[in-house]
Image (tube, coloured by chain):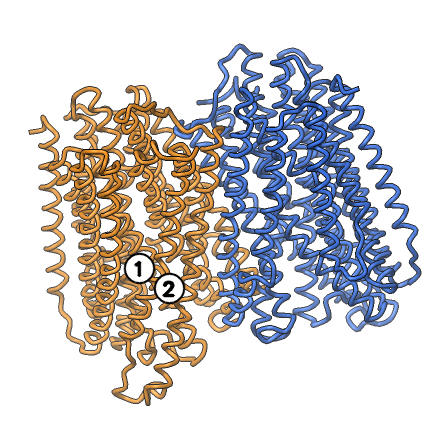
Chain colours: A blue, B orange
Amino acid sequence: MFASLDGFLRLALLVSMLAFAFASWLYQWVNRQPSSNPRVAEVGKYIRDGSYTFLRAEYKELAKFAGILAVLILIFLPKGIWLGNPAENVLMAVAYLAGTIFSGAAGYIGISIATIANIKSAEAAQQGIRSSFMASFRGGAVMGMSVVGSVLLGVSCLLYITDNTSVLLGFSFGASSIALFAKAGGGIFTKSADISADLVGKVELGIPEDDPRNPAVIADNVGDNVGDVAGMGADLFDSNVASISAALVIASVLDKGMGSVVNASMVICFATLGLLSSMIGVSMAKMGEKSNPTQALNNSTYITTAIFVVVTGIATSVLGYNWRIWGASMVGLAIGVIIGMVTDYFTNDEKPPVRATAKAAETGPAFTILSGISYGFMSVLPPLIGIGVSSLVAYKLCEPIGEGYAMFGIAMAAVGMLSIVGMIISNDAYGPIVDNARGLVEMGDLGEEALEATDILDSAGNTVKAITKGFAIGAAGLTVIALLGAFMSEVNEAAVRLGLVGISGFDIMDPTVFFGMLVGGGVPALFSAMLMLGVSRNAQRMVVEIHRQFNDIPGLKEGEPGVVPEYAKCIEIATSGALKELVPAGAATIGITLLVGYVGGVKALGGFLCGNIVTGLLLALFMSNAGGLWDNAKKFVESGHHGGKGSDAHKAAVVGDTVGDPFKDTAGPSINTQITVVSLIASLAATLFLTMSIF
Amino acid sequence: MFASLDGFLRLALLVSMLAFAFASWLYQWVNRQPSSNPRVAEVGKYIRDGSYTFLRAEYKELAKFAGILAVLILIFLPKGIWLGNPAENVLMAVAYLAGTIFSGAAGYIGISIATIANIKSAEAAQQGIRSSFMASFRGGAVMGMSVVGSVLLGVSCLLYITDNTSVLLGFSFGASSIALFAKAGGGIFTKSADISADLVGKVELGIPEDDPRNPAVIADNVGDNVGDVAGMGADLFDSNVASISAALVIASVLDKGMGSVVNASMVICFATLGLLSSMIGVSMAKMGEKSNPTQALNNSTYITTAIFVVVTGIATSVLGYNWRIWGASMVGLAIGVIIGMVTDYFTNDEKPPVRATAKAAETGPAFTILSGISYGFMSVLPPLIGIGVSSLVAYKLCEPIGEGYAMFGIAMAAVGMLSIVGMIISNDAYGPIVDNARGLVEMGDLGEEALEATDILDSAGNTVKAITKGFAIGAAGLTVIALLGAFMSEVNEAAVRLGLVGISGFDIMDPTVFFGMLVGGGVPALFSAMLMLGVSRNAQRMVVEIHRQFNDIPGLKEGEPGVVPEYAKCIEIATSGALKELVPAGAATIGITLLVGYVGGVKALGGFLCGNIVTGLLLALFMSNAGGLWDNAKKFVESGHHGGKGSDAHKAAVVGDTVGDPFKDTAGPSINTQITVVSLIASLAATLFLTMSIF
């Protein structure tokens, strides 16, 4: 059975089906939980409908975008269709569309369960914290299993059918397109809703945060789902596909040399075992009598990790894989955990950075900002060193195996790091579900005890979120290094096909490379600036609409019974605005990439990717960590320190949190996707720019 | 006479002497201007004494630091002294010390004239704006001429005596040490004084900005001088030396190959002609009847540029230099001007970014911050593209000449860009002088007309400052690329000496290079974070002292006549604190550089430099531009827009300005120096890490 790659692919298909079955069981389980409160059901329905409104609008835009890109791919990639072999171009376009559909479907499933699980979890909180935990966690796990199941299903189907690893880059690019829309678009949506709701509600009218009179309040809750559930899921879908694709592209070159499938099979095998480990980890998760939710979440992550280490070890031994490559995977896994711990240090309110920033809030908003920016800057170096060291170690570990294995080692480190991604997504999707549940408990008036339970669950969600966010950025870091390797493989394969001289690397001292590097270095800054300005503009539009409703709907401001604001209108504006703001940012990024390729050819593109990775990681880590830090500094002040709620320090901390919101929820995490998109475009267009460039 | 390099060096010596003579004439001219007001004289003396207090303390610390480094250089550089040829080590240590002394002396001269010119300029304002302009501009020009004169004197003397270009790197490193202390230390000083004076004076007690009761008010004025005059002078001294040294190191390798001195002589010749052009430009500067000061400053810059273009063209034709290399210099010059224009766009209050940020201030401090950060991020890409394109064009222009000329072209682009640096420094030093003069006019009560005149002069200073700042960063960008080339030259020369295989470049795909790149990319973030946190801590210390004085000195708070605060005490605290905060930041940077070299050898160091350049330029541009933008947005609001002074928008704009202050005056401009320091250490330690590294 293990003799050919097909065997592995069939196994992968089987396991992905198992994951879907498991997800479906979890879905049913969550759906079976009792719910009865009509007020919770009503608000829950608003959130659910709003989320679907956004998804539908997003997918409609995306369909146009994907359609255009599919046509362009058909014409130009992997090389001009007029140059013969149109079947390859058709295959690439189909793979691209498949990538968008698979990722989109996973996001849809995630939203669909998250907007059920929030209700179930809210009502379960009346029975106690443990049942509420189970409802939210299993809701999140549906998303985790669906995402990783879809990744494995898509990759193995494509490989089974086409037997061509380059096609995987098309699939991966499709996933990136979705991630760009879901993460950046969702990020703009969620923050503009959040900010405009606060500006008019809390600041102007002085009504509480989740007041149902506020027309933007449902949009704000929808934002948690579309940004954090669908967006984050698409992001990790993207990284996961990219890491596996990059590893397979490199493996196929190695395997071709020896006429075997050992390396490719190892990639498939490890990815499959990662999903299996996550399934076991998820099924074992529960809150003990005396444990807390953070412990429960962390325990299941540790269990998953331990199982993965053991089963891949057994597989390596039984199937005769090279232990050095196994070691590289383990290095990646370890560094993911370490980066998570660093993120925790900089964003945990029991550690000095958050404490110092909360204290700085006493001296006013300017010092809160300066302190957060400073610690945010500081938080960047340790993960960068971690990624650098792990790629160096993985490389050196696998270098002795033979030519080309060093880069394969890095790719396998990324695969290793992302192996437990099913578990990570489950933990991460848990966060917005309990956040929503907490809101529902409040709006449905389910009692003090339930509120307390969901408060504890929510706080655990925030802690775990910081760790998984660090993990996601680290994973993206290693993945894009592997993609850089895949890019070079693509370039050289194309060069051979075209009878051109290939390239042996990208020398910094070559000014074409250096030019690309400087330009690539500036792109993440431009991209995040455009997203953040988009949030501001979109929030302004929503403010206008909120004002209109308060003025035009009689009795709304006064809270007369039966008077309901037009929630859907706000959701519509947030949706269309978010997509409108996203397009120029995405187009600028893609346009500059193509321009650099046209000016400097593949060498400039190599430099471009490299500069993009370095400053992209820098800014992503900076913005995510600074944002998390300000958020927790505000919560620390609110919990009664430095004057507590309502004090001047609190006002200053709120300014920090408001700046941090688009940092950590819009721009920061979108940069990951920006890097992946750019890397994939470069790989896909490698052939094009080999033959067509100014320098 | 032009047959040998010695002839050129003698000419350079002559011109540098001429520059000193000119500076001395300007000094006398400024000193001869009338001054009579006793109050102005008194406050002026406080500022002067305070500036010397800082300089003395700084130079004392620096002497220790330089002493230790000189000993380390003596032992380890260019290679372990135990490996033979101790004379080389002695020479390197001496060159290093000479670099510190020359740069230090230029800074001392600058401070000495700036603290005279401020008084003269204040009193001249009573006679009208044109006399006041002349006093400030000629004061600034003393600094300009001294700095560039010292650079040329130092470089040509060293070369004349030793005939060894590597020694120049030692000289350059000495200049960088001073720049690190002057720019970063001065930056911490000036901002902690500024912030603490405002916090206690304006915020707590509600007394005006320049109230003489405030013990920190003189420290604040001193800060303008030590940060902007001495600091900026040291920074440009450093860049200028580095660009000439890098070009000479590369030229010497080229010349050795053909047994001539043509390339080295071209470097010396162009640098000499640049100084001559600046002298002519400075001597022609004056404000016409109907012109404004900005025009006057810009006109003299254009005159200098035009003269430089013509005379280097003549020199190239007469001396038979290669026109391609001349072209590369012109490309550098042009791109410097373009970068200045981009900076102007993002920081000028007549352009959209400042206007939008001022408007955002209406919605509160968080949006002011987000808007400034967004436009700051956006402002980064055009200059990066500019630097990338200019290095690419310079490279491609000179590549056909022969092997090695391509990198020489980049070095000559940097030399070309910095050729008019004498003029740039003159314009830049003009800023803090008129700023001080304005304060003196107010404190000395010299009348409305004088205040109006100095207001106009001050505003011109701010506009020109933004342009020169962009210019300085662009120059640093090209210089460090040239230094990267010099680093490789050094590595290969050392490899030949040691019988090792040299390196042909730094391949991004080599994980050692990539590891270095990621770590190097994180360093500027860490460095700026440490400086900014240093400002906060130091400001806290000063606040304690200001409180103490208001409590302990009877009658101070009430403003009883004859009661004077202990200004010197505040200056002392600002000084010792600034140096204390600076040392860890500098030590961390240097330590990490050496560690990376030890771990990954010269390849990792090459990557390290590259990552450092990319993110260093990114952060330097971001912080300088965002800071300038906030400053001008605040001024725009203060001039009566969006509610004007005292409005909520004004308060929000002040928060932006306070965040921007350490951005633009401490961290941003210090990153230049950090990059240069790191590049030079890498070059100097090249031999060491060729033989001693883990990987």
Q: Which residue is mark 2?
A: B191
Q: Which residue is mark 1?
A: B227
Residue type marked 1: Gly
Residue A281: percent from the left, percent from the top?
A: 77, 44
- Dividing the image into 4 quarters, which one contains the C terminus of chain A? top left
- Dividing the image into 4 quarters, which one contains the N terminus of chain A? top right
On screen, residue A561 versus residue A167, left or right, reads right
Disc 1 from disc 2: Cα separation: 9 Å
In the rendered view, tell whether residue B549 sits above or below residue B356.
Answer: below
Residue type marked 2: Lys
Q: Residues within 10 Å of mark 2 (few under 14, many from 20)?
A: many
In the rendered view, tell whether residue A456 sits above or below residue B1.
Answer: below
Q: Could you tell me if residue A371 is visible in this image? A: yes
The answer to which of B360 and A452 lies nearer the viewer is A452
- Name the mark on residue B619: none
The answer to which of B40 and B82 lies nearer the viewer is B82
Residue B68: percent from the left, percent from the top?
A: 25, 51
On screen, residue A689 versus residue B245, left or right, reads right
Q: Residues within 10 Å of mark 1 (few under 14, many from 20)?
A: many
Q: Could you tell me if residue B310 is visible in this image? A: no
The residue at the point 73 percent across, 49 percent down is A427
